[in-house]
Image (cartoon, rainbow, N blue to C red):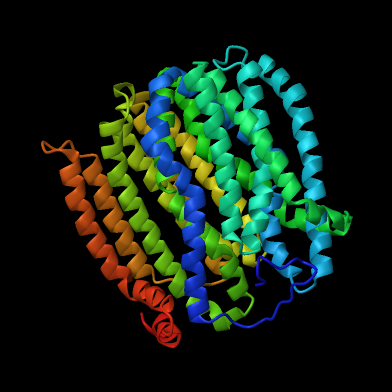
């Protein structure tokens, strides 16, 4: 893949199979930078912002924000046509011709601007009418709350495409820079309107809108050279053929992600929705490092997959190592969030302590789903993504209606995790039929059993302080997971040492 510092006019590509050293080193360095982008702000949020929000936002206000953001993001994801995922795949199809690559990317970006116009018209004409007709007593009115969330989601939609281009260009440093800018803008406005002016839910949503508008303007400026390639229908047509099946997939997938809050709001108070939403935010944030690894792995997977059967064994070994690493992240997150909630959050949110580990587990299985999904995208059979997500969505809705009336937010958490297990299993079997990757399923299964044991510990009402029990559990679980993946981890470490490239590649390729 070309260097990120090269322009598309000057880049050249050679089709050679990457060495073990370059692959492992690139994956580790890329994952580190994506992790900084995805969890650097989350680390600050854990220890500074989340406790601050918990102090200045009541659970009811947090529930209003969560429901508003869910509706805004659902609209943008549905009308955005999922062009970003097609761009990640088709970018590599045109990478050998700088002129054709620029024309393709330009066509996609101009189309994105068209979809933004569609979002604005739909959001401010159709959505209020639908709400007035079908849910006139909904606790969160369109104006001002949902309107502010829609605007913020559109601004972040522009950021998504700047991040996508940095990802396929293998420029995680620049990805980190725009992500950090977005975060700093959000924090600045949030402190102003939430802490200084005490404007509650309205102030927080206004802060998100202003930050999103600011970062959208910055990203459009940074992408200006890509817009000079014009617009051609056949490029958009090819992109839509791949992305159209993703639209219902993402709508059901996003519904899978947020439906529990709306069902919970039907049976319980909006304050309980707020506590659950905070638990969900914490659980999801703790697992952002897993997303970082997947982002770093995605371009490498597609680059390797171009070489067919010659690279499949390496794909299987590396993917299995990543799956075990994701499990370790989930173990760490599940044990840490309980301690964090008890020690740092306002007592009104104490109920999140045992809910958040279930959310972390849900995103573990979503990460495993994302690893398998790459095979379906490589085969250009995105319709299988919808098949798996729709099945999981149906399971999630059914279980929420069964469990929430009795267990409240705990029922939402249980249903969410079961649904993500379903989607991960379905995608694994679909993807293996399309583009077989020889995973080390024995090791992955053992790692998942370790995680389930850890989850059980977080639900135990121990007579000892949770930081002692969780600390001991963390040490034991880490030791077991290290034994399951230790050889691969040593190979990656050796690859990063100067002069050890050949030995590292032998270890990576030959060691089980």
* Residue 440 in which image quadrant: bottom left
Residue 351 is situated, as x and y percent measured from the top left of the image, at 31, 28
Q: Residue at x 43, y 37 (%)?
A: 45
Can you name the residue that lies furthest to the top here?
Answer: 137
Answer whether residue 275 is visible to the viewer in this image: no
The residue lying toward the viewer, choosing from 435 and 488, is: 488
Image quarter of residue 450: bottom left
How many numbered circles does the render carry? 0
Horizontal placement of 238 versus 23: left or right? right
- For the point 82% across and 41% down, which residue is it? 114
- Up the image or down, 57 lies above or below 40; here it is above
Is 235 situated above or below 286? below
Q: Is residue 177 visible?
A: yes
Quadrant location of the N terminus in the rendered image? bottom right
In front of the other: 203 or 177: 177
Residue at image point 38% right, 68% down: 441
Does residue 480 appear left or right of residue 512 in this picture?
left
Work out which quarter of the rendered image holds the C terminus and state it. Answer: bottom left
Between residues 377 and 462, which one lies in front from this camera angle?
A: 462
Compare residues 37 and 249 and report the one nearer the observer.
Answer: 37
Give the x, y percent position of residue 249. 62, 47
Q: Is residue 255 above or below residue 363?
A: above
At a point 54% along the width and 15% down the height, the residue shown is: 139
* Horizontal and vertical percent position of residue 34: 51, 56
């Amino acid at each position: 893949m070309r260097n990120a510092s090269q322009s598309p006019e000057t880049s050249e590509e050679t089709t050679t199979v990457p060495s073990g050293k370059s692959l492992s080193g690139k994956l580790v360095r890329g994952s580190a930078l994506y992790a900084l982008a995805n969890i650097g702000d989350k680390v600050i949020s854990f220890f500074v912002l989340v406790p601050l929000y918990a102090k200045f936002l009541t659970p009811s206000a947090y529930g209003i924000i969560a429901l508003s953001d869910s509706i805004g993001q659902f609209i943008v994801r549905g009308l955005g046509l999922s062009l970003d995922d097609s761009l990640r795949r088709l970018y590599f199809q045109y990478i050998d011709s700088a002129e054709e690559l620029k024309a393709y990317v330009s066509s996609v970006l101009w189309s994105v601007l068209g979809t933004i116009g569609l979002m604005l018209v739909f959001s401010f004409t159709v959505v209020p009418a639908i709400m007035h007709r079908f849910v006139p007593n909904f606790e969160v009115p369109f104006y001002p709350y949902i309107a502010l969330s829609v605007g913020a989601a559109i601004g972040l939609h522009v950021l998504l495409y700047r991040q996508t281009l940095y990802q396929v260009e293998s420029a995680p440093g620049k990805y980190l820079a725009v992500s950090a800018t977005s975060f700093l803008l959000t924090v600045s406005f949030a402190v102003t309107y939430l802490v200084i002016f005490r404007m509650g839910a309205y102030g927080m949503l206004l802060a998100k809108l202003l930050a999103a508008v600011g970062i959208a303007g910055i990203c459009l400026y940074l992408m200006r050279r890509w817009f000079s390639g014009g617009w051609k229908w056949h490029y958009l047509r090819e992109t839509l053929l791949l992305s159209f099946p993703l639209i219902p997939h993402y709508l059901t997938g996003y519904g899978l992600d947020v439906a529990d809050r709306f069902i919970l709001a039907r049976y319980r108070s909006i304050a309980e929705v707020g506590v659950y939403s905070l638990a969900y935010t914490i659980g999801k944030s703790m697992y952002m490092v897993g997303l970082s690894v997947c982002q770093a792995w995605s371009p490498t997977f597609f680059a390797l997959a171009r070489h067919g059967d010659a690279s499949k064994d390496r794909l299987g070994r590396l993917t299995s190592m990543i799956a075990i690493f994701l499990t370790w992240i989930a173990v760490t997150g599940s044990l840490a969030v309980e301690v964090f909630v008890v020690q740092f959050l306002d007592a009104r949110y104490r109920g999140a302590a045992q809910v958040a580990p279930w959310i972390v587990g849900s995103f573990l299985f979503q990460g495993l789903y994302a690893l398998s999904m790459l095979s379906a995208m490589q085969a250009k059979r995105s319709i299988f993504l919808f098949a798996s997500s729709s099945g999981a969505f149906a399971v999630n809705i059914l279980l929420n209606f069964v469990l929430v009336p009795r267990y409240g937010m705990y029922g939402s958490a249980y249903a969410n995790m079961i649904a993500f297990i379903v989607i991960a299993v379905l995608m694994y079997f679909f993807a293996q039929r399309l583009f077989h990757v020889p995973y080390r399923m024995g090791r992955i299964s053992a790692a998942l059993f370790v995680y389930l044991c850890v989850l059980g510990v977080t639900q135990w009402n121990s007579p000892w302080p949770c930081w002692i029990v969780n600390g001991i559990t963390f040490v034991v679980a880490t030791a077991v997971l290290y034994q399951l993946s230790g050889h691969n981890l040593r190979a990656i470490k050796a690859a990063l040492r100067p002069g050890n490239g050949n030995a590292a590649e032998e270890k990576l390729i030959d060691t089980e």
